[in-house]
Amino acid sequence: MKDNYSVKQLAKLAGVSVRTLHLYDQLGLLKPSIRTESRYRRYGEKELLRLQQILFYKVLDFPLKEINPILDDPDFDLIKALEGHKELLTIKREHLTTLLNTIDKTVNHLKNKTMSNYEELYEGMPKEQTEAYRKEAIEKWGEDVVIRSEKALLEMPKLNMEQLKTDQKDIAQKLASLVNENPESEVVQEQIARHYANIRSFWGVTDPTDLKIETYKGLANLYVADERYTNVEGKANPAFAAFMHKAMMNFADSKLK
């Protein structure tokens, strides 16, 4: 095994960025074995094995601040750690296999109507998390909306579902590009009308007289009250949240009366 890697060589070998290795150095998580007179970092086998441990712990969802004390513990045993990783990753693999089976079963149901109960939609997912999401949805939208939505999704042909998702993405992109426009302008309201229709489909609402005005306004309020609704690549976007809230409220008040 080569025992003298530059930071670029190690980054390529491990599939991480040079910036990540620099960060690990700054945090004291992965120090180079030596620094040359020109201050270049060089890494040996010991550092390669430590980086492997760091990446294993990251895969297992350990935060960086918890990894350092584990690796620096005088009683840390590399072989025992690897055996522990194998056990946890085996459990994770079995969990992912269950989730993949759930996807296959859901796709099969959408094509052939094979599911017998809604619980099969969530097989392999953390029960507490699933129940929490469902409870939150019921509190926000009402039990009838959630049940109707689940029923509609189960009964919806696969092609329709894919089209809904494609439309949802297209609408979101167009609205994001209009964030500097007046929320009440015609061009914005045109996209909000598409947004409203798309949301109604996800809710499973087909009755044209059932406008869901207050429910749609409730969603508008969530855009400014809950940052999860306007996250962009994991980051909150308050400007877009305020834009969506104003545009949706205007649509509800002017078009749904």
Image (spheres, rainbow, N blue to C red):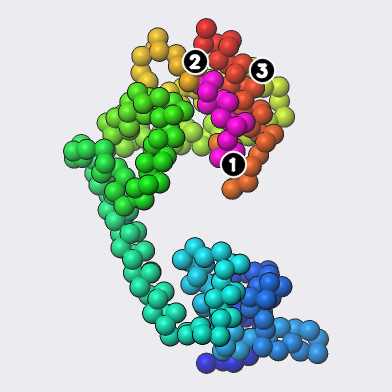
What kind of element bears circle 3? loop
What kind of element bears circle 1? loop
Between the C-alphas of marks 3 and 2, the distance is 17 Å
Say if 40 sits above or below 162 in the image.
Answer: below
Disc 1 crowd rating (10 Å Cα; few below 14, some 14-19, many 20+) is some
In the rendered image, is residue 212 in sight? Answer: yes
Camera-nearest residue between 92 and 195: 92
Residue to which mark 3 is pinned? 184
- The amino acid beneath tag 3 is Glu
Left or right position of 104 against 188: left
Residue 218 magenta = yes
The circle drawn on residue 231 is 1
Residue to which mark 2 is pinned? 213
| Rendered location of residue 56, percent (x, y) | 48, 72
Does the residue at mark 3 contact the one at mark 1 (Cβ under 8 Å)? Answer: no
Between the C-alphas of marks 3 and 1, the distance is 23 Å
Q: Quarter-wise, where is residue 255 in the image? A: top right
- The amino acid beneath tag 1 is Asn
Which of labels 3 and 2 is toward the front? 2
